[in-house]
Image (cartoon, grey):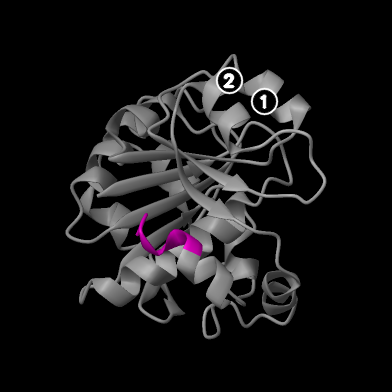
Amino acid sequence: MLVICWSVKGGSGTTVVAAALSLLLARSHPEGCVAIDLGTDLSAALGLPQPCRSGLGDWIVADGSVGGEALLMLAATAGSGVELIGAGAACDPAAPRWELAATVLAEADRPVVVDAGGVPPPSFLERAAHSLLVIRPCYLALRRATQLPGRVSGIVLVDEPGRALGRRDVESVIGVPVVAEIPLDPSVARAVDAGLLSCRLPATLGRALKAVA
């Protein structure tokens, strides 16, 4: 099962959502979960240093002799049942091997969660079992979301007190249901800052994403 977490605007909370989903899926699957750090911040959110091993981008630019089985071998232990594959070398999102990568990840024997950061490669959106747009009830973000470049199966809404827009507005503009609503909670920021998210997932975050996981 391939799950893509992405956004149309920076600072939406995509990385924290991807980290929490990875942890929740790892708890419910004996084989654990693989997390892909395309946004380059996921390892830090999980309390790890930046991965020093080769990442997905290095596999993408490798020649055809490096097969699909080598991709999941890049995963390094991140703790709590999660294995992490870093972004690796920067490469063209239209490179042919992105499609093979999407196929390998979609057919993996355990859940795969991708923190895409921004808009993921088209082949990832096509092969994803769940394409989750992480967004705040922000006019500028919603304006960009009206020109979404790919399939969205659900919205993860990060609430902000005092906003004029709400859940119904977001669903109406994008035309996709909100599958999780996450209240802003200082304990989430504290857990990330302290590097404790992977071992002390805040209750508000876990409750909000439990049904999605």
**Residue underneath mark 1:** 142
Across and down, in percent, residue 18 comes to 50, 56
In the figure, is residue 111 to the left or right of 16?
A: left
Residue 91, above or below 55: above
**Can residue 104 be seen?**
yes
2 and 1 marks in contact (CB < 8 Å): yes
**Circle nearer the N terminus (2, 1):** 1
Q: Secondary structure at mark 1?
A: helix
Across and down, in percent, residue 175 comes to 47, 21
Residue 51, above or below 211: below
**Can residue 66 be seen?**
no
Residue 131, above or below 171: below
The residue type indicated by label 2 comes to Val
In the figure, is residue 166 to the left or right of 20?
A: right
The residue type indicated by label 1 comes to Leu
State how far apart marks 2 and 1 are (Cα).
7 Å
Give the residue drawn at x 35%, y 59%.
Answer: 211
Give the residue drawn at x 68%, y 45%.
Answer: 12
Residue 148 occupies which quadrant of the picture? top right
Residue 211, above or below 65: below
Across and down, in percent, residue 11 comes to 74, 46
In the figure, is residue 56 to the left or right of 8?
A: left
| Label 2 vs label 1, nearer the camera | 2
Q: As drawn, which residue projects farthest toward the right?
A: 162
Which of 161 and 73 lies nearest the eye of the viewer? 161
**Residue underneath mark 2:** 173
Which of 17 and 58 lies nearest the eye of the viewer? 17
Local packing at callout 2 (Cα closer than 10 Å; few below 14, some 14-19, many 20+) is: few
Q: Which residues are magenta?
A: 208-213
